Amino acid sequence: MSGVSVDLDPAIHAFRKDLADTALAGRIIASHYAEPLLRHLSLDTPLRDAPSPSAEVVAALSAGDAFRMLDCSLGWAWGYAPGGRVGYVETKTIGA
């Protein structure tokens, strides 16, 4: 078995070639799987579709919103925003 095993929407299902949510194990093939960690945003911030300040904004998030983080590297956190939308926020906006 190789590649994506079923068609899932990456806007609401957290998977990349290198990493996927453990909830998708058995449905998606990825190099690694992670359990989302609950964090809260410390600042208002845009949710972007890629880890870049020029990437498309897909949602506006508010300080205090829950963010279920799967990855945090190179200044960006990737995970689920409220409502289940998957995307990236700058790590400086993540609190405890």
Image: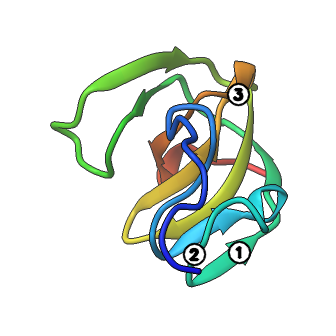
Dot 3 or dot 1, earlier in sequence: 1
Horizontal side, residue 41 vs residue 19: left or right: right
Tell me the kind of residue under disc 3: Gly
The amino acid marked with disc number 1 is Tyr
Secondary structure beneath label 1: strand
**Earlier residue among tags 3 and 2:** 2
Write the residue at 22% across / 41% down.
Answer: 53
Circle on res. 94? none
Q: Which residue is labeled 2 in the image? A: 30
Q: Residue at x 78, y 67 (%)?
A: 26
- Residue that protrudes farthest toward the left in the picture: 54
Asked if 83 appears above or below 28 in the picture, the reply is: above
In the image, residue 55 lies at what x, y percent? 22, 36
Q: Nearer the viewer, mark 2 or mark 1?
A: 2
x then y, percent, for residue 78: 54, 53
Give the residue type at disc 2: Ala
- Closer to the camera in the image, 85 or 24: 24
Q: Is residue 28 left or right of residue 59?
A: right
- Labelled pair 3, 2 in contact (Cβ < 8 Å): no
Question: Which residue has dot 1 on it?
Answer: 33
Q: Residues within 10 Å of mark 1 (few under 14, many from 20)?
A: some
Q: Residues within 10 Å of mark 2 (few under 14, many from 20)?
A: some
Q: Is residue 19 left or right of residue 41?
A: left
**Foreground disc of the pair 3, 2:** 2
Q: 44 or 50: nearer the eye?
A: 50
Q: Would you name the residue on which mark 3 appears?
A: 84
Q: CA distance from mark 3 to mark 1?
A: 18 Å
